[in-house]
Image: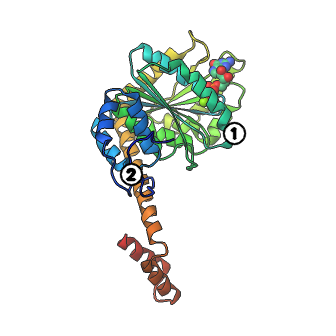
Amino acid sequence: MTSEGLAVQADAPAGPTGRRGRRAADVPTLVERAREGDARSVARLISLVEDASPALREVAAALAPHTGHAQVLGLTGSPGVGKSTTTTALVRALRATGKRVGVLAVDPSSPFSGGALLGDRVRMQDHAGDSGVYIRSMASRGHLGGLSWSTPQALRVLDAAGCDVVLIETVGVGQSELEIASLADTTLVLVAPGMGDGIQAAKAGILEVADVFVVNKADRDGADTTVRDLRYMLSLGGRHSEAGQWRPPIVKTVASRDADNGIDQVLEKIETHREWLAASGEGQRRRSERAAREIEAIALATLRERMGDVHGSAALGTLAGRVVAGESDPYRAADELLDEL
Ligand SMILES: Nc1nc2c(ncn2[C@@H]2O[C@H](COP(=O)(O)OP(=O)(O)O)[C@@H](O)[C@H]2O)c(=O)[nH]1
Ligand SMILES: [Mg+2]
């Protein structure tokens, strides 16, 4: 992504912390315009965070007072299960109720995803020209898992821009469903009949992250079997079986249909979950956890950056020399190094 000609000083390489470089002069203006619903400004701000622009810190600071409003919905599931189709249907249904909606489609890092993504873009054009919808594909930048560190920041941009709901679509491979669950208020796990997803879900620990199960492609044979499999697996325990805990409902959908597609039932379950989050205090807990992870990730990245500065430095050389000479040990030397950072 480019920063679309924005006057940002790119004089020094910035890491994910945006620690280096100078500030961009017009971040406050961009934030102001984004808050007025200007899609270009939203796009520029997301590009800034995605590019780890030197202005990242200023952007984060300017956004902060305007965040915390958006309801964040995560959608995950195997490739082809119907995540993009469901996202599109959810956007349509939410728009019909007058909600402002943001979509972050996180490009999977796997190499065989290119084709699907193009399809996503085309179908998403359903909503092109609707100023109440903001859709953005995010690169995952080869980061571990499907979500990059910039996704939470992009989420903040959409939140500050006044989105009532932000949908994050990501392919459920490995780490990414855990990451999406940590970002989202409500996580939807999509499965489809005949894909062996039920079993895969159990293996991948998807059961633990799902707040709502969506059995999509319910027009196909085997949908009821898939529902039964899921119900059976849920009955086996896990966090959901404890008293007072949320029991993930299972909803059948045919997302590719324009009407009578089950999407309204999905929205009902999301609403019920939202109420449970508020009543149980779990919502607040999740948001704190989300912020804690963000802080941790930034702190670790900052540390890594500083370690980069240290590598080959005289201080490290001295410490190394003392370890080689047997005057110190690597643990003590590492403590001394950290003390200096
Ligand atoms: N029969 C049927 N096909 C569907 C349904 N939902 C999506 N599809 C099709 O499944 C394919 C993959 O959908 P897509 O939304 O791109 O899946 P994603 O990879 O999970 O985002 C597309 O060809 C869709 O048209 C459904 O409910 N029933
Ligand atoms: Mg998709």
Q: Residues within 10 Å of mark 1 (few under 14, many from 20)?
A: few
- Discs 1/2, front: 2
N-terminal of the pair, mark 1 or mark 2, is: 2
Gap between marks 1 and 2 measured at Cα = 35 Å
Q: With 265 as the anchor, is 116 left or right in this view? A: right
> Which residue is tagged 2?
9
- Quarter of the image holding residue 340? bottom left
Taking the image as shown, residue 46 lies to the left or right of residue 34, namely right
What residue would you read off at disc 1?
112
Q: Residues within 10 Å of mark 2 (few under 14, many from 20)?
A: some
> Which residue appears farthest toward the top when viewing the image?
259
Identify the residue shown where x is 66% and y is 29%: 80
Label 1 CB sits under 8 Å from any ligand 1 atom: no
Q: Position of residue 282 (x, y in %)?
A: 38, 36
Quarter-wise, where is residue 184 in the image? top left
- Residue 192 visible in the shown view: no
Q: Position of residue 22 (x, y in %)?
A: 34, 54
Respond yes or no on whether mark 2 lies under 8 Å from ligand 2: no
Q: Secondary structure at mark 2?
A: loop
Observer-nearest residue: 136 or 262? Answer: 136
Quadrant in which residue 31 is drawn: top left
The three-letter amino acid code for the residue at tag 2 is Gln
Query: Looking at the image, which residue is at 50% across and 89% down?
Result: 326
**Ligand 1 placement by image quarter:** top right
Q: Position of residue 56 (x, y in %)?
A: 38, 48
Q: Could you say which is closer to the camera, residue 256 or residue 135?
A: 135
Callout 1: SS: helix
Q: Which x, y percent locates residue 258?
A: 57, 11
**Image height of 163 relative to 262, above or below:** below
Q: Residue at x 55, y 44 (%)?
A: 140
Q: Looking at the image, which is closer to me, 160 or 144?
A: 160
